[in-house]
Image: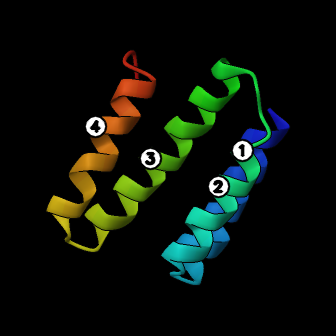
Amino acid sequence: EMLMSDLAAAMDNLLFQQRKTDATKQFYEALTKPIPDSSIRKDLSYVYNYEFSRFYYNEGKYAASLPYAEQALESRPQS
């Protein structure tokens, strides 16, 4: 739960407020790299991909949004 909220807060700040896509990706990679639990990694992947999809969709960049939406759906098919 704490990692999920940390990622969500970082994405809000880096991606939506500062619009720094590269910094957001670097943060995500640094956060998830040492995590051995695949279920936690899957949950974090969902948040990451969902938020990137939403970011690009809101920008009107639908083609850029689609791969992230597909990855989010793959991480959490029930959502």
Q: Are marks 1 and 4 in contact (CB under 8 Å)?
A: no
Q: CA distance from mark 3 to mark 2?
A: 10 Å
Q: CA distance from mark 4 to mark 3?
A: 8 Å
Earlier residue among tags 4 and 2: 2
Identified at 64% across, 55% down, the residue is 28
Picture coordinates of residue 79, whole percent (x, y): 40, 23
**How many numbered callouts?**
4
Q: Residue placed farthest to the top in the image?
A: 78
Picture coordinates of residue 46, whole percent (x, y): 50, 36
Q: CA distance from mark 2 to mark 1?
A: 8 Å
Q: Residue placed farthest to the left in the image?
A: 63
**Which residue is tagged 3?**
49
Dividing the picture into quadrants, the one containing residue 41 is top right
Q: Nearer the viewer, mark 3 or mark 2?
A: 2
Q: Are marks 4 and 2 in contact (CB under 8 Å)?
A: no
**Which residue is tagged 4?**
70
